[in-house]
Amino acid sequence: MNRDPLELLGDLPDWPGTRPPKNRGNSGTNYLTAVDRFNGAKPVVYRIGGVDRQLFTVGELAKALNRKAITIRSWEHKGWLPKATYRTPAPSGHQLPNTSPKGRRLYSMEQVEFLLNAAEQYKIDDPHHPDWEGFRNHIKNHWPKG
C-alpha cells in the first residue's frame, strides 16, 4: 500500500465548484508552493553607486533568522556580527538627546543568505545542540563584505 494519497483525488480541481476563483490567475495554481527561505522577509531596493541593490533592514534580517530585531542589534553590539555595511541617510535633527543621528542598518542579500546558511550549518535553532562558538567564529572569519 505505497500509493500516494493524492492519487485518490484524481483530476479534481484545487477549488470547489465548477468555476475557478478570480483571484488565482488563469491556471488556478498560481500560489506559492516552495518554502520561503526568508520567512517572509522582504528586501528593499536602494540605489548605491548607480546600481540597484536589494537590501534588508535589521527588522527584515531578524524575520529571516526567526529572531527579534533587538537580538540582531545585540549581536552587533557584542561583536558577533560586523557593523552593517550600509545605512540609510541619517534623519534630520536629533531624535534622542546626547546621541548622534544614524541611518537604519541595511544588510545585503549575500549577507542575509550567508547568515541563514551559517544558522543552519551550526544549528543555532536546535535547543539541544547549538554550536554558538562555531557560528560566531564562522561569521567573524567569512563575513561577506556586501
Image: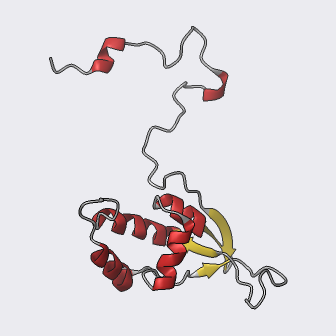
Q: Is residue 98 above or below residue 111?
A: below
Residue at 30% x, 16% y: name it: 7
* Residue 118: image location, x then y, percent: 34, 69
Q: Is residue 74 above or below residue 33?
A: below
Q: Is residue 87 above or below residue 9?
A: below
The residue at the far front in this view is 97
Q: 31 and 99: which one is in front?
A: 99
98 vs 37, left or right, is right
5 vs 100, left or right, is left
Residue at 56% x, 82% y: name it: 85
Q: 10 and 91: which one is in front?
A: 91
Quarter location, residue 87: bottom right
Q: Is residue 29 above or below residue 39?
A: above
* Residue 6: image location, x then y, percent: 33, 19
**Number of numbered callouts drawn:** 0
| Image quarter in which the N terminus is found | top left
The residue at the far top in this view is 18
* Residue 53: image location, x then y, percent: 61, 69
Quarter location, residue 56: bottom right
Q: Would residue 32 be visible to someone looking at this image?
A: yes
Residue at 46% x, 58% y: name it: 66
